Structure formats: structure tokens, C-alpha cells
Image (tube, grey):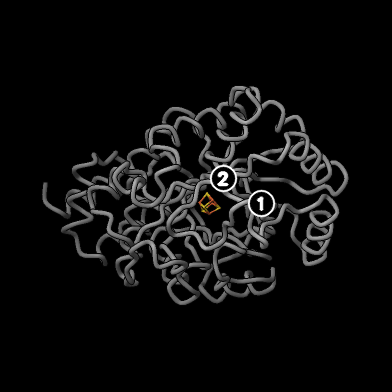
Amino acid sequence: MTMNSLLFKAVEGKRLTPAEALDILKNASWTDVVEAGNTVRHRLNPGNKVGYTAFRIVNYTNVCEITCSFCSFCRPAHSSEAYVLSLDEIRQKTNEAKAKGADQIFLQGGVNKDIPLNYYVDVLKMLTRELGVKVRGFSPVELKRIAEFNNMTLDELLDILKEAGLSSVPGAGAEILSDRMRQLLSPKKLPAQVWCGTLATCHRKGLPGSANIVFGSIETPEEIIEHLDYVRKTQDIAQGFKSFVVWTFQPQTDKFPIRHVRGDEYLKLLALSRLYLDNIPHIEVSLLGMGLSLGELGLHSGADDINSIVIEENVLQNHGLTTIEAAEEFIRNAGFTPYRRSLNFD
Ligand code: SF4
């Protein structure tokens, strides 16, 4: 197929094969891919609306045994900087977020074996029943390890957390779903297949979330397509990804090679994600990682959502928007009509 006919195939709603997506990633002009991505965005999400949500990330502990090479946030348990937030501290952070208009909390930790199961249950109950916020929380590796620490299956753990108030699980810790890259990034993290299987279990339990890609290291184009294909196959099985976010690695440590991602490279992958992930409703542009100028272009390249207003973010520096007014103004200035959504797009 010629490049034009490949892009036309995707625009028409026919599914791209991995080989076709690779051909587009390697050989198509970025402007053509962006145009196709924008067309598909308007076919799948007609109208002029762009979504945002407002939440606070609460990093309930910084103790983590996974020690990803790119992470500057985690501390060993014996470190003088190690912490686990008390319920009162989480309550205070949540009330601060609510005062700024946030209605969702994103609980994210390290993997800390010293935290008892009751802590998670008590935190979730407090957040949802006492404070009335919705909670997305726990990456696949956190869930797998918490289940192991408590000698239970993932299914059993999810039942307990859902009953306590958890309503969504993030697709965190995906980075690049290629086992070669995962060995380099974080040998203790879940292999790609296990990451997908863990989220499929969450989704079947009624705990949807988002998926993402983090690129801009020494991943190959083949590994990027492998990643997209893992996500698409997982979505075919369990339909729990409400959106897909395209991120780039941010400089945090010198233990992991990252490269500068050009704007056109970012937009091309954003648009290709829109073309390839025909079974995921929304594509989010990452203002947090890429900044506002490129974010605006992303809304004309396949994205129909600006990711989120993040009230607190410890793992990354915040380059995004921090108030609801700023988010709505940004969306309007980009030529769209803002609408506020929940973390689960419901
Ligand atoms: S990125 Fe997450 S899982 Fe990896 S070391 Fe940091 S806190 Fe732990």
C-alpha cells in the first residue's frame, strides 16, 4: 500500500496492522499523520468539545522497592526522607484539593511492604465515604505486590479495595511495553504481558482507567508499535481503557538515557496513537510533560482531552495547568469548548 492509502485506511475506520503502523511511524510525513489523526479524532468524538478533569495526586508513601532507573522520588525504607502519610495528612491534602475545585484523588505510592492492608482500606473509606471524592489508585505493580504481601490473589485484593471505594486503576508503570526496555528501565517491574493481564483483571472487575506510553529514551520504532499493540489487544479483551495518554520521559536521574523529543515527533506519535487505537475512546495530550504550546497543537492532531489539572505532582515537575479557570481558558483559546469529566470519563 502507498502511504496515502495506509492513512486513508485508518481514516476510514479500518484497523491498521502492526506492520502498517510501523511503516507510518518510520516513513510518513508527520503533517500527513497529524491530519489523519485529527480526522479520526473528529469521527470518533464529533463536535468541538475538549475534556479536562481536576484531581490531586497523593503520593501516600515514597518508600519503594522497585527502584526504577528514571525515578528520583523513591526512597529506601531506612532513609531519613522515607515517609508514609497518615490518614490525617491525606485528609488535609484532600480538603485542600477540594477547596481548589478538585473532586478526584489519585493515590499513588511506591511499593512499600510495611504498609498493612487495613491502611489502604481505611484511606479509601475516608476519601470516598467521609470526604466524597472519587479515587483512582495503585499501579499494576503496586496491586500485584500488595496482593503478594497479603497472601491473596489479585482478584481478592481488588474486591476488598473496590468495596472500600476504589473506582479506577491507572495504567501507570507502562512506560514502554517491551521487555528489553523494561529490563533497562526497571528490572523489578512487571513484564509487559503481566502488566496487561493485571489491568485486564482490574477492568473486568469494573475498575477502568487509562493507558499511556512514555517514550524518548532508546526505544526503537518497533518497540513503540509493540507497545501500542499490547494496549490495543488488552482493550480488545477487557475494554477498560477510557483514554490513552502520550508522555515523554522527563529528566529525573542520570541512571537512565533520555533524549530530547522534538515537537513534530511527539505530535506524530500522538496522531498515530489515535489511528492505531481504534478501540480506545479518547486520546489525551500531555500538557504536564510537553507544555502548553505543543499541547494546543496536540488538540489539532488527534487528542480530544488535555489530560488533567494536577494540584500536586511529586514524581514530575508540574509544567501544566493548575486551576480550573486556566484549563477552560486554555481550551477556549485553542478553539474548543471545555467540558469537565471524571477520571473515568463518566
Ligand atoms: S516510578 Fe513508581 S514504581 Fe518506579 S521506583 Fe518510582 S515510585 Fe517506585
Q: Amino acid at mark 2?
A: Pro
- Check residue 138 in the rendering and tell me which mark sits there, or answer none: none
SS class of the residue under badge 1? strand
SS class of the residue under badge 2? loop
Can residue 49 be seen by looking at this rendering?
no
Left or right: where does residue 16 sit relative to residue 97?
left
Q: Residues within 10 Å of mark 2 (few under 14, many from 20)?
A: many
Residue 202 vertical position relative to residue 217 in the rendered view, above or below: above
Circle 2 residue: 170
Residue 230 appears at what percent x and percent y?
A: 36, 38
Q: Residue at x 43, y 56 (%)?
A: 69
Circle 1 residue: 106
Q: Residue at x 17, y 51 (%)?
A: 23
Q: Amino acid at mark 1?
A: Phe
| Residue furthest out toward the left | 2
Residue 73 vertical position relative to residue 334 in the rendered view, above or below: above
The reply to whether the C-beta atoms of the residues labelled 2 and 1 are less than 8 Å apart is: yes
Residue 61 appears at what percent x and percent y?
A: 67, 52
Residue 150 appears at what percent x and percent y?
A: 66, 28
Residue 19 vertical position relative to residue 302 in the rendered view, above or below: above
Residue 171 vertical position relative to residue 270 in the rendered view, above or below: above
Left or right: where does residue 255 sit relative to residue 10?
right
Specify the quadrant of the image occupied by residue 20: top left
